[in-house]
Image (spheres, rainbow, N blue to C red):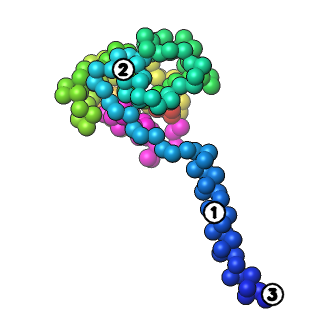
Amino acid sequence: MTGKHNIMRLPAAWFIVLGLVFAALLIYVGTPMAAPKQVKSAKPGDCAACHGQEKVFSPSHVDTKAMTYKDCLGCHEKAGPQKLEGKLPGSHIHQLGGITCVKCHESGQKEEEVAMDKCVVCHNADKLAEKTAKVKPENPHTSPHYGTTLDCNLCHHQHKKSENFCAQCHKYDFVVP
């Protein structure tokens, strides 16, 4: 065989390899889960109200229907491999604390962004700045640019993954709950 024929077979071989890799990934990852429906009347700890039959926990996990966030912290301490900080969406922490959607979203609609003045009713900005004063390299709740008035929503998201707003310009590696 000449080199010309070997080159012509190479793309077909690559397509076969890529097809096998893609099939393996589908088997490993599975099909994507549907987004949970938001149920305004869901009680704290009643995951099935929104998630339905979706497997949220392993079969050996304790029943959560009567649990609050503080109950969860009995097993999931603030540090270590079982920690919930940064893993559980803010909406879930609020729900487990008995704070319903309507408490912050007057209409109860997800699309309505909550104004910072609602956040600081429960989360006092000055107390948060004091609590995080020793965080290095900079206190995330006392901005040298905005003081304690930076909108909470720039970092903390309730219905999607939170983000480090400061990382747009700085190399701070904060875990944003």
Please name which of the two marks, 1 or 2, marks the residue nearer to the observer.
Answer: 1
Magenta-colored stretch includes residue 43: no
Q: Residue type at mark 2: give it.
A: Gln
- Judge the density around disc 1: few (<14), some (14-19), many (≥20) Cα neighbours within 10 Å: few
- State the image quarter where residue 126 is shown: top left
Query: What's drawn in magenta, residue-wise?
Result: 151-173
In the rendered view, does 22 fall on the left or right side of 175?
Answer: right
The alpha-carbon separation of the residues under discs 1 and 2 comes to 43 Å
What residue would you read off at disc 2?
Answer: 95
Q: Residue furthest right?
A: 1
Q: Which residue type carries mark 3? A: Met
Residue 59 got which mark?
none
Picture quadrant of residue 129: top left
Q: Is residue 54 left or right of residue 9?
A: left
- 24 sits left or right of 101 in the view: right
Q: Secondary structure at mark 3?
A: loop
- Name the element at disc 1: helix
**Residue positioned 56% across, 19% down in the render:** 61
The residue sitting at 41% across, 24% down in the picture is 48
Residue 152: % across, % down:
34, 31
Q: How far apart are the alpha carbons under marks 2 and 3? A: 68 Å
Question: Does residue 152 show up?
Answer: no
| Rendered location of residue 86, percent (x, y) | 49, 30
Q: Is residue 88 something one can see in this rendering? A: yes
The earlier-in-sequence mark between 1 and 3 is 3
Residue behind mark 3: 1
Q: Earlier in the sequence, mark 2 or mark 3?
A: 3
Q: Which residue is mark 1?
A: 18
User: Which sits in the foreground, 42 or 110?
Assistant: 42
Q: Say if the magenta span includes residue 170.
A: yes
Measure how far apart labels 1 and 3 are at the Cα level. 25 Å
